[in-house]
Image (cartoon, rainbow, N blue to C red):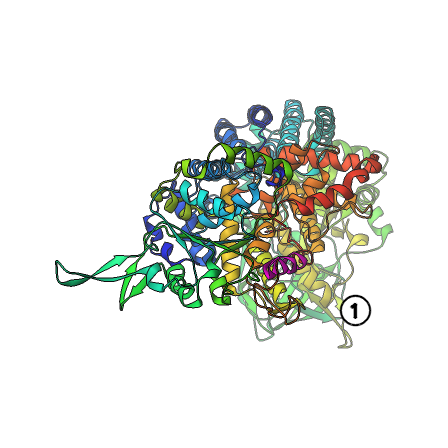
Amino acid sequence: MSAGSRSPSPSHSMARTPQAVARNSRAVRIGLLVAGLAGQLAVAPLLPFVAFALGVSGLLVVSVTAMHLPIDAGTGRGRLRWNWQWRQVVALVLIVVPGILAMYRLHPGDAASEAQTLALMLVFVQIAHTLASSTRREVGLGCTVVVAMFAVAVAFAGDVIVFIALCAGLAAIAVTGTLLRRAALLESADGSALTTAASVVRSCVAAIAVAIALGAVVFLMIPNSDKLRGRQGIAATGAGFAHGDERATAGLSSSTVDLRARGPLSNAAVFSTSSDAPPYWQGAIYDSFDGTRWTAPGGESSQLWQLSNTRAGNGAQVQLAPASTVVGEPATRTDDVTMAASAELDVVLSPGLPLAYAGPGRVISNDDGSAILIPAARGALSYQVASAVAPASDAELRAASGPDPTDPRWTAVPATIAPRVGDLARRLTATSGDRFDAVNAIEDYLRNNEKYDLDSPEPARGDDAVDDFLFVSHRGFCEQFATAAVVMLRSVGVPARLVTGYAFGETTSDPGRRIFRGSDAHAWVQVYYPGVGWVDSDPTASQASSPPSAARSIRQRVTDALGRAWHRLPGGRGGALLVLCLVLAVSLSVAPAAGRRLVRRRRRLALGGSADGPVLAAYLRLEAELVGSGRSREPEETFGEFARRLGGLAATPLEVANAMALLERECYARESRRPSAAESASALEVFERLRAAARCEPVTLVASSAAAAAAANRSGEASP
Amino acid sequence: MDPRLSKDAWPNLTTPSSRGAELAHLAIVDDTFDSVPDGYATESRSLAEDAATRLISNVEQVVHGRRAAVELVVAGLLAGGHVLVQDVPGSGKTTLAHAVARSVGGEFRRIQCTADLLPGDITGSAMWNPSSQEFRFVAGPVFANVLLVDELNRATPRAQSALLEAMDEAMVTVDGVRHALPNPFFVVATQNPSDQYGTYPLPEGQLDRFALGLTLGPNDRATERKVMREQLIRATVGDLQPVLEPDELRWLQLEVRRTYVADAVLDFALSVVAATREHPNVRVGASSRAALSLLRCAQARALVLGRNYVVPDDIKTLAPTALGHRVVLAPGVGGPLSGNGASSTGVTALGVTVVREVLASVPVPLRA
């Protein structure tokens, strides 16, 4: 027997390419460093504390991951000795959950505190993450957090410098991602690991281009980019958000209506009237507006209220409207109102200026005509209300003349309202002959240019709600429409006020009744016409949504909940953007890995095996190439025998034997002893070469294969 | 296969890293075959490879052109099994056995079997000592580290069976007293083709005790010429120096046991063994002991080649030698006697053919 019968070389001669590994990890480290620096550049325009916190976290991720990377590359299996995965999960849960709780519990609505808590949380997350990150994938997640930092920066600072930082940072992240991906490829030693430097440069350039394009898009998406929303924005809105928890309950006499918050609209019935009653039932009246909130007259100046000491009940009628509020000699009508069993009412709802009330409870009437019930009426009660019905005909309104009320609050416009609102109003009403035309011009403008949307975005902090509605979001619901109309009317000197109540309702199976539900709550405008009085005017009228059905109410409930969660996010739109970026980044970083895993799993299932290593995968590709040519491995042939058959063709016998030995090691050695990526590289290369040769010159391979096979089958045996 | 080694408790092994201990601890839970500590550091593995290579090259100094056979015998030695070499007289089997035996240090004995060999001649017996007025046990040749049993099939079945206990349990019982044999204990036996005059075919149980049964086959002309030239100058076997101490051999045998056998390889071995039982020409296929022996020898071969894991190649290379002498052929296949030792080439050769056929039909698993 010849010495050739000895099986192909011992497996110690695994090929290592330490240079490649080192080069690789160095590139990744540099990429991370650039990303971290760019991240700090991006957060620089923020508050000092936020900048400091984010900077520290960025530095942490860069330094610690850079510290880890060489170890990663060296071990080849991409894992440090300590396996901290479960600790990582625990740490994240322990840090993130209290962080979120703290954010919502300790500083509700305080923008600056929210930002600080957020930044602190990011720091903690970073610490936990970097403590635990031990693989390239985790380093990739660190990059995701850097992306989140950019999002924070974008959310709080709207500046050209952010655009530059954004582009630089995104580019750096993209390059890092590409390098990481390449490293992962080299590690998993996929077929495409054999990419050339040129292809890497190409993909880097592509990544940078995409990043810059993305940065531009994000920059353009940032609202109000023309004004700096950095420092002063955060500082200014602190006060505004102090009341962020309050919920406007339209139609009920809450002392304020906050345009930033919208209460849930229940589908439950509130009250019913006869079906011939007017559609608008007013409840509370608001006079003063501060840019985001309406305040009822009694809210802050109770001396305006006149208490009616008469105890109502037993059919006794209470005169409500003070003489000063009744203008001229209006037509009156009397309505019977039946409250639903579950309803609670603290204002007297009336289809016009309430004049007299007969029903349960005590009534306080205001000088503007609204009436409050004390205590609030609960349960299935009914009352009678007499009200003055303003004339509806256009001619009467056009003909209206006389003095306006002297009270300046009906024409007061808050100083914080952007001047362009007034400009718009003046432009719209410039051609209007009379008050009626002016009102119609403004309302038509609103109907035609703004979109009615129950889930409209909440105005960002620091903005006045009217400006935001008219010029930025162009979306709003009745409160925004009515508020905008009132502000615009007032800014051209027309006395106007906001009214909340119920509108339209629906006729029911119960004939002759009109039922009003929680979802019918509405806000509209009352305009003063001299000699006529306050006249209802609804800029939302033609845009109100269709009456809700039961199915819609579930959907509405869900969207309400989502909307509330959305509105609770820190930083308003910026917070939304942050979450969006986070989700995007996480999915982007997870998707390729998940996809790869899926593909690998499918391939594995197709082959019926349990786990394919990279060398085996490469070998199987080679085998697939050989299938059909009669040169593929017989199922009964071992790798060693096959190697002897293939040897000396496209690769030297030693190369083939070494590659096969690696393959054997991957297949049959203990898991901890399987070849590393660096070791596998040579085998992959040989298999690829053989595959290429098999594809190009099938004849070369065929020639000696039969003889070699016969020889191989004989060798390695001791006899005969 | 050989219970002697199991006396060496695993905890005594030093593990090179705490991670190895960790792994071993984890492995015990799910895979008993993995419970052997992952202790084979690369250094110890290459030391083992060095020792094995040293042994092989030492034997090859006197046995030419039989590299594969030498490797097999060494594999059997390291596996802790016993080896049966069979061929026509004068083919060099005694030289091979002798060379291996001499290369391993320690006590070396030789038994030349004849028809009148008694069990006591092998095991030793109690002798009357007139001076001390008592029977004293005088150890026979079996008390050795390496025992060369020449022409085993010339001994009577009674004498052969005396070897049985020794090979199986590393103990001999004489006059009701059990005596432990030295460790390591390695039997290399030779056998003439059994149709020659005056031989007793080995019982199947006895054959099963041999881990490997190999046939040497004729040398080619060039090798034979070389052998002649050397032999004309001097008889070289006697000049061989031992290259392994018994301690070293024990350690090597431990290293063999620590060689990793992946599930796929284990299944492959079991498939091969199972297939021998289903072969049409086979009456009784290879036993479970045969499978274990095959795997152990495969471990040893892996070590000889410097690997710390067994590959299907090991199984495939060793299967004819490890299983060929154990399969019992169906009546009429190997001639009238149909035992293992019927024709001039030996029914063992037929067994080897059967195993080769089997190997050509069992697919090699690709994955762990």
| Location of the N terminus of chain A (image quadrant) | top right
Between B334 and A193, the one lying in front of the other is B334
User: How many numbered tags mark residues here?
Assistant: 1
Amino acid type, residue under disc 1 in the picture? Asp
Judged by its main secondary structure, the magenta piece is helix
The answer to whether residue A37 of the structure is visible from this angle is: yes
User: Residue lying furthest bottom in this view?
Assistant: A510
User: Is label 1 in a helix, a strand or a loop?
Assistant: loop
Report x, y in % for residue A458.
Answer: 65, 44
Task: Identify the residue position indicated by label 1 in the image.
Answer: A276
Q: Residue at x 62, y 54 (%)?
A: A610
Q: Is B346 in the magenta?
A: yes
Q: Quadrant of residue A553?
A: bottom right
Q: Is residue A216 above or below residue A489?
A: above
Q: Residues within 10 Å of mark 1 (few under 14, many from 20)?
A: few
The residue positioned 44% from the left and 66% from the top of the image is B156
**Residue B149 horizontal side relative to residue B195, left or right:** left
The residues colored magenta run: B345-358
Give me the residue at 63% from left, 66% from top: A357
Which percent across, then down, holds residue A523? 69, 53
Residue A579's image quarter?
A: top right
Check the image and name the residue furthest to the left. Answer: B132
Q: Nearer the viewer, residue A357 or B42?
A: B42
**Measured along the vertical axis of the image, is residue A114 above or below residue A268?**
above
Residue A573 visible, this angle: no
Chain letter of mark 1 equals A
